[in-house]
Image: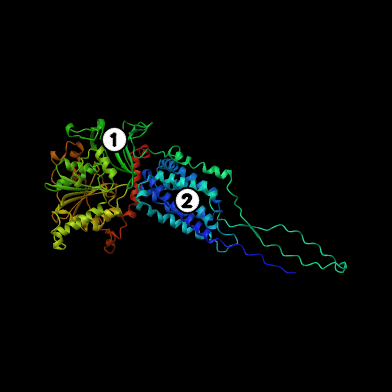
Amino acid sequence: MSSRLPPPPPRANTFHVALTRVAAIGVLLGLSLVTWAYRRALEPQYGSAPASLHLGKVVWSASILGSFAPTVPVGRATLGLALLLYALPSATYYVAAYTARLGDPIWGPVATHLIVLLPVLSLGVAIVKALQEAPYNKEDVSAPQSSITLPVCATAINSLQGLWPSIPYIATLPDSQIFLQAGTAVASLWTIAPFLPNVTPPRLVRPLTAAPATPEPKGKQRKGTPKKSEPASPPPTIPRHNAPAPGGSSKLRVALLPLLPFLTSTILRPATLPHPLLEPYNHPSHPLRILYSVDSIYSGVVVVGETTAADPNVPGNIDHLRYLRAGHSLLGGVWVGPKAQAWDPELLLEDEAGQKLGDTIYSAFVVQEAALLAKKQPKNALIIGLGTGIAATSFMRHGIETTLVEIDPAVYDAAKRFFGLPAPPPERLVLQDAKTWVHNRSVTARSGSGETDESKSSLLPTFERFDVVVHDCFSGGSVPAHLYTQSFWRDLKDIVTPDAVVAVNFAGSLNSKSAKAIILTLRSVFPQCRAFYDALEAHGDINNEFVNWVFFCTPSTNALEFRRATQSDFLGSYLRRHVLTSLSEHEGDISTIGDDIPEDKREQYILKDMVNPLADWQQKEAIKHWKIMRGVLPDVVWETY
């Protein structure tokens, strides 16, 4: 009796393997894009630091779930992923609004990640796993393992997020549009899937065979009957494809394609305001009006709002306040309406619509103006980081030629339209990153002063150095670390006069690592520095309080002194008169800051371009700042944008 081994299962088709690999890479790119947009969509309600704190861990958790869960049918999973992506704009907004009201900037974002993002990523990773397994039979030992899918997916989703800000089209696309367009792309693939080539290997089906005849007993065989041969081996396995041809239900899917643009522009629109906002929006249940709201590639969203009356449901007195926010950072605000007051009403500023504007809500901006008290007859000034333009406007009103360097055009536009900032001459408006601009100007300054080839310096125009600099780049609970390095301050020193005054804003505690690093780095470049805080009342333990500080430094070796403020310094402002006349009462002692750091570790606190831990150190400060901002303005203000 002979026997044959069953034929080996068919090998995976090379073309199908390549096709599914490309599809899996596309899914991973899409998941990284959605994760990046999701994080950016959270920033208006949570800020950048809380939104990013544990996001990477959630990505790994989703990858674990998707990798080790049972293999999902690709068709159904694709439809489910499309529906989840369509729900992302509203789900992100409403869940974040609810969790933020709980008041926890650490676990609130984590809960939002788990509710909103985890299902999307888990299902997406499960699709990647199914695509990897699709071209293989179960018996194929070359099929990829789930343990390989996990690290590949998690690493790709986390690392590829840095790719998207460098693509101009993606960087300027609203987060909600990224979600909806991704959902439309996935839904479109689901509708045409029945018409695409089937990459699943054929199913192995064995045909039915008749039962072998019962052999007659030995010796009973009749004469003349031929001897029966051995039963033949069963025929080879017959491959059979398990995907039917597209039918009526499959063709019905295609009819849904024209509906997708309609759905994304109507029913699936996000709960946020239109960006840009074409007309002022009045909140239906709170005395709040939004005058301006636009998307920003730098801040997520830039909003100008105004409280129109006292809200009985909110403690505090914040009626008739106009504010400017970028993401979850309050860049500044002024009093309007009946609270726009001055001892001479003619000295009040006006916005472009002619509405009177009162004092700033942040006295730190007035403390910055004290730089004019330390510099005799300044002729020109440099503003790095505009905000509402309080200091810049004051300098211009004093007749000082002022150059503005602001990275976000939306912030400049808001300051000019709604906060009375005079439009500077084109040559004094710089809308770009300050690091590059200051460095390029420093190179020009060194060339013009003869530090490089004389033949080249003779071709350069006369170089103008600045008498006063205000550096205020605080946003979202932290500062852009690259604008606080030793090389940046050295470049800045090259473009100011020998006795210039540089005012640097910082929000936080002087005993924090970030404050020590900034102070020690400033001192490594400028021989003289003093510090003042903006609190209207003196504090006992001011070094441990979270307050706004302004560090005043100069390249001069002479003592940094401030003259007494006079009537002309106040510009009709009650707040300026109070802050500038009581400046000496709000000075902090920074002479001993950093003395507790051992000499062998002191160099670690000098911020450099290649070694800069400032962003990491500011994580804790950003958490504190979020809680403070939630106490300054009610939840409805942060939820309306």
Tag 1: amino acid: Leu
Can you give x and y, in whole percent of width and height, for residue 149 in the image? 50, 58
Residue 321 circle label: 1
Residue placed farthest to the front in the image?
224
Q: Earlier in the sequence, mark 2 or mark 1?
A: 2
Can you give x and y, in whole percent of width and height, for residue 349 in the image? 20, 35
Quarter of the image with the C terminus in it = top left
Q: Quadrant of residue 247?
A: top right
Q: Observer-nearest residue: 594 or 367?
A: 367
Can you give x and y, in whole percent of width and height, for residue 557 in the image? 14, 56
Mark 2 or mark 1, whichever is nearer to me: 2
Q: Observer-nearest residue: 504 or 439?
A: 439
Task: Please tell me how crowded label 1 is: few (under 14), some (14-19), or many (20+) other residues with Cα within 10 Å.
Answer: many
Residue 121 circle label: 2
Colour mode of the rendering: rainbow
Q: Is residue 219 above or below residue 332?
A: below
Tag 2: amino acid: Leu
Name the residue at 31% across, 31% down.
308
Name the residue at 29% across, 43% down.
410
- For label 2, the SS is helix
